[in-house]
């Protein structure tokens, strides 16, 4: 339904009329006199003065502009029906590695081989969709960590920002410790007791100022649980006739990731392919369920911009009309 947020402001609608009736008319200064040598000149001046008076049409426009300004100040709004919005009281940050190694094509998806970041985007995007009731945020890190999306209930925006992430935009190295530090800085400002960080990487800490284990100890004191996910395929055959072996996950520091999770009360997972990665996120759904505590809200859509725009348009028309009259008089 339609309503005013501040309806008491409508009481000032008759203010211009009250001021016109209450204030005394402007009087000429004592001793001031208009002296003209000829009667024709006096009549011409009187005609010019009458032309300066506001025409009736412009007066009505001014009254309408004032009414619209008052209506806009009273905060007109459309209030929709009440709706239950689930709230869990959990803040969940995703930290995704964007170092150069994430472009390796060793993840299988639907019979095709895709790079690691593409696999993460697909599975993590579905994970974000399922976190109804959580405030979700996104950190992208490489040589430096960046807060791409602050904690928000707008999960679709977080998912979109994840889809737009590109390998290498944060540098080629991997700063796991600094990524955890940035997450702790953001989670320290939250009022919720349930704070969770899901950190996904395919390498070891090779950059940054904060050591990962030192960051994990700070997280434990702060009460933040960290779930670490190591991504990378198992060693496979490659090269000429299979004599040369490759190990896509050889740079993965599983020992440090396991220790980080253990210190903070979380768990370490290993994702060797896309199916495993999807199972990991589903396990996280079970470990950290989005417990829904419905709160009733009534969505409100502000409408002040419409009367305000009309009032400004009318004011502009009155100004232009008066400016034209003045130019005509001066001519």
Image (cartoon, rainbow, N blue to C red):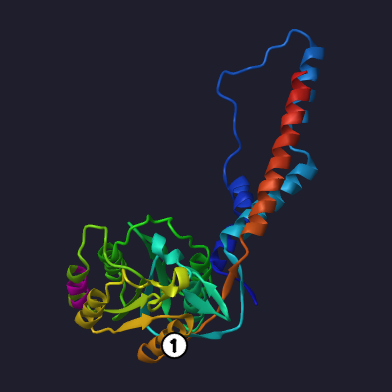
Residue visible at 41% across and 88% down?
285
Task: Report if residue 218 lies within the magenta region.
Answer: yes
Q: Which of 200 and 104 is in front in this view?
A: 104
Query: Splitting the image into 4 quarters, where does residue 178 fall?
Result: bottom left
Farthest residue toward the right?
40
Q: Can residue 116 be seen in this view?
A: no
Quarter of the figure that contains the N terminus: bottom right
Span colored in magenta: 215-220
Side of 99 relative to 308 (left or right) = left
Quadrant that contains the C terminus? top right
Tell me where residue 13 appears, x and y as whole percent.
Answer: 62, 57
Total label count?
1
In the picture, residue 151 is in which quadrant? bottom left
Kindly identify the residue that appears in the image at 44 percent across and 88 percent down.
Answer: 279
Residue 226 picture location, percent across and down: 29, 78
Left or right: where 57 falls relative to 170 = right
Q: Is residue 321 left or right of residue 32?
A: right
Q: Could you tell me which residue is drawn at 44 percent across and 89 percent down?
A: 292
**Residue under label 1:** 279
Q: Nearest the camera: 326 or 287?
A: 287
Rendered view: 288 above or below 148:
below
Disc 1 element: helix
Name of the residue lying farthest toward the bottom: 286
Q: Main secondary structure of the magenta part?
A: helix
Depth check: 317 or 210 in front? 210
Could you tell me if residue 111 is visible in this image? yes
Q: Which of 75 and 244 is in front in this view?
A: 244
Does the magenta segment cover residue 24?
Answer: no
Q: How crowded is mark 1: few (under 14 residues within 10 Å), some or many (20 or more)?
A: some
Residue 113 locus on image (x, y percent): 53, 74
Q: Quadrant of residue 234?
A: bottom left
């Amino acid at each position: 339904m339609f309503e005013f947020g501040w309806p008491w402001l409508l009481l000032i609608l008759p203010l211009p009329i009250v001021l016109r009736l209450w204030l005394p008319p402007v009087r000429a200064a004592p001793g001031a006199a208009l002296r003209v040598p000829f009667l024709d000149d006096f009549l011409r001046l009187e005609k010019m003065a009458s032309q300066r008076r506001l025409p009736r049409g412009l007066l009505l426009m001014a009254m309408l502009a004032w009414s619209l300004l008052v209506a806009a100040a009273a905060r007109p709004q459309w209030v929709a029906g009440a709706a239950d919005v689930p709230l869990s009281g959990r803040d969940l940050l995703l930290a995704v590695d964007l170092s150069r190694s994430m472009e390796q094509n060793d993840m299988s998806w639907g019979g095709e081989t895709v790079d690691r970041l593409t696999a993460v985007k697909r599975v993590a995007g579905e994970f974000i969709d399922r976190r109804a009731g959580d405030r979700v945020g996104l950190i992208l890190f490489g040589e430096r960590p960046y807060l791409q999306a602050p904690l928000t209930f707008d999960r679709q925006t977080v998912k979109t920002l994840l889809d737009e992430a590109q390998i290498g935009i944060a540098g080629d190295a991997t700063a796991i410790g600094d990524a955890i530090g940035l997450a702790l800085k953001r989670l320290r400002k939250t009022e919720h007791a349930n704070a969770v960080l899901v950190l996904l990487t395919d390498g070891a800490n090779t950059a940054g100022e904060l050591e990962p284990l030192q960051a994990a100890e700070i997280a434990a004191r702060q009460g933040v649980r960290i779930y670490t996910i190591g991504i990378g395929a198992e060693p496979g055959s490659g090269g000429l006739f299979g004599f040369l072996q490759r190990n896509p996950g050889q740079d993965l520091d599983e020992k440090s990731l396991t220790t980080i999770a253990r210190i903070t009360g979380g768990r370490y997972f290993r994702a060797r392919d896309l199916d495993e990665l999807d199972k990991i996120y589903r396990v996280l759904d079970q470990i950290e369920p989005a417990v829904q505590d419905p709160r009733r809200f009534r969505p409100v859509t502000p409408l002040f911009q419409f009367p305000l725009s009309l009032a400004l348009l009318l004011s502009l028309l009155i100004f232009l009309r008066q400016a034209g009259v003045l130019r005509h008089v001066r001519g």
